[in-house]
Amino acid sequence: MPSFDIVSKTDVQTLDNAINVAKREILNRYDFHGSKSTIELDKKTMTISILTEDDMRLESIIDAIRSRMIKQKLSPQCLDEGKEIIGSGNMVKKDILVKQGIDKETAKKINKDIKDSKLKVQPQIMDDQIRVTAKKIDDLQAIIALVSHNNYELPLQFVNFK
């Protein structure tokens, strides 16, 4: 039976390249000369740590990261921005989590939308992905169109189409 998986993954190497290019871009800007701003990507925990002097520079850094991600064909929807923490002195720190996988609530929404479509497919939630099986490939393609048309605030990919 034909099937495919719905996943939400971010390529770590492409993200690392986007962060490095954004870092170089920011350090060369005139308004950041003499700044003690740092941007770091922790590949194990998938968090981006930003440390800078004020909120204006923090927003400029985040905008530069988003624009670089878009140019590298990564969706900025995978960024989960937390609260900013005021550090020692006049520094502002912010940790941005890069979401990997589909969380349970979003998986249930996708599953419900697939079942409400009345197509003869069987969606199955498997950890952080959803496997959809059907007898006809046309039904699977209709499900891909349905899911990609809806906005689940996650970048979704369709893999393992068999």
Image (cartoon, rainbow, N blue to C red):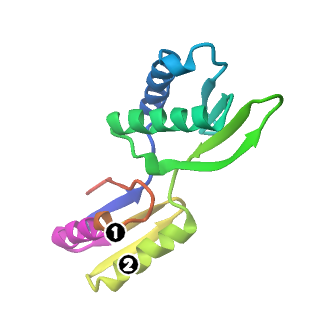
Alpha carbons under labels 1 and 2: distance apart: 9 Å
Quarter of the image where the C terminus is located: bottom left
> Could you tell me the amino acid type at mark 2?
Asp
Q: Which residue is drawn at 27% across and 73% down?
A: 134
- Which element carries disc 1, helix, strand or loop? loop
> Could you tell me the amino acid type at mark 1?
Asn
Mark 1 burial class by Cα count in 10 Å: few <14, some 14-19, many 20+: few
> Which mark's residue is nearer the viewer, 1 or 2?
1
Q: In this view, does 61 lie above or below 124?
A: above
In the foreground, 24 or 77: 24
Find the magenta span and give its range.
133-146
Image location (x, y in percent) of residue 38: 63, 23
Quarter of the image where the N terminus is located: bottom left
Q: Is the magenta stretch mostly helix, strand or loop?
A: helix
> Which residue lies under the disc numbered 1?
150
Q: Which residue is drawn at 45% across and 51% down?
A: 77
In the foreground, 141 or 27: 27
Q: Name the quadrant containing residue 153.
A: bottom left
Q: In this view, does 133 lie to the left or right of 130?
A: left
Q: Residue furthest left?
A: 138
> Which residue lies under the disc numbered 2?
113
Q: In this view, does 46 lie to the left or right of 25?
A: right
**Residue 17: assigned label:** none
Q: In this view, does 127 lie to the left or right of 137?
A: right
Do we see residue 43 in this rendering?
no
- Asked whether residue 141 is drawn in magenta, I would say yes
Image location (x, y in percent) of residue 110: 42, 72
Residues at discs 1 and 2 in contact (Cβ within 8 Å): yes
